[in-house]
Amino acid sequence: MAFGGFPRRVQFTPVPSPLFGPLLEQIDDLGELKCTLRLVWLLHQKKGYPKFVTLSELLADRTLAKSLVGLEEKPDVRHSVRLAVARGTFVEGTVAQDGETVYMLNTERDRAAMAAISEGRLGPEARSDIELWDANIERPNIFAIYEDNIGSLSPMIADELRDAEQLYPAAWIEEAFREAVEQNKRSWRYVERILERWAQEGRGDGKPGRYLKKAGRY
């Protein structure tokens, strides 16, 4: 199936420049490359400091797992991330408090933070709202959620909902609709602004609408 193109207001993820230069020349394993790109994205979803991704988050990540299916060597997540660590793209450590394996970018600042976490001098405060994969959960699509909570669909709104499905995790969309209903702000514009704020500032900070402009209604 061909990719349908990028939606309007597509979100961008900062990527370290060496990944498009010397690292791109060196990486010869497709599983490692996919794991590297996904791990950079996952780190970008974090808020606060230090930013790290746990092994359990990597193992539960649906996109990463699906991206490795069908590769000739059939690599698993552990193998791919080990290659990335061995190459020096990321650093690996263990949280002193609970023994959890975590990964950070291999920068001077993050190496110092990783040492502090491993020695128990820095707590693992940085958590995220990365959606974990539960293959047994079937989520309703965004159109059904809209009709259940707001009303009838128009063609223009349907287009915007399709864009939103490409931009945001399903769990975010469901929660944003729930927050809008609780605030008695039953409009797509209000839901959209909640999602935009979460994408910029992290999900779960403050009450819904705290940073929003007055939303219009459809």
Image (cartoon, rainbow, N blue to C red):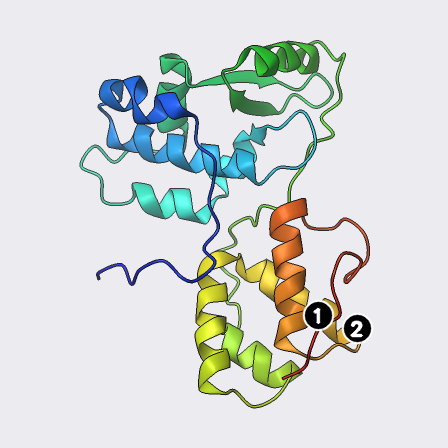
Residue for point 74% across, 67% down: 179
Taking depth in this image into account, of 201 and 74 the one nearest to the observer is: 201
Q: Is residue 169 above or below residue 140?
A: above
Residue for point 58% across, 79% down: 146
The amino acid type of the residue labelled 2 equals Glu
| CA separation in Å, label 2 and label 1 | 6 Å
Give the left or right position of residue 175, taking residue 157 as reference.
right
Give the left or right position of residue 148, taking residue 124 as reference.
left
Q: Is residue 3 above or below residue 74?
A: below
On the question of residue 174 being in view, the answer is no
Look at the image and tell me in which quarter the N terminus lies: bottom left
For label 2, count other residues whose C-alpha is less than 10 Å away and answer few (under 14), some (14-19) or many (20+): few
**Can you identify the residue that label 1 sits on?**
178
Q: Secondary structure at mark 2?
A: helix
Numbered circle sitting on residue 182? 2
Residue 212: quadrant of the picture? bottom right
Residue 36: x %, y % from top left: 39, 30
Look at the image and tell me in which quarter the C terminus lies: bottom right
Residue 185: x %, y % from top left: 75, 76
Residue 106: x %, y % from top left: 49, 16
Residue 30: quadrant of the picture? top left
Find out whether the residues at labels 2 and 1 contact each other: C-beta distance under 8 Å: yes
Residue 109: x %, y % from top left: 60, 13
Q: Secondary structure at mark 1?
A: helix
Q: Is residue 184 above or below residue 94?
A: below
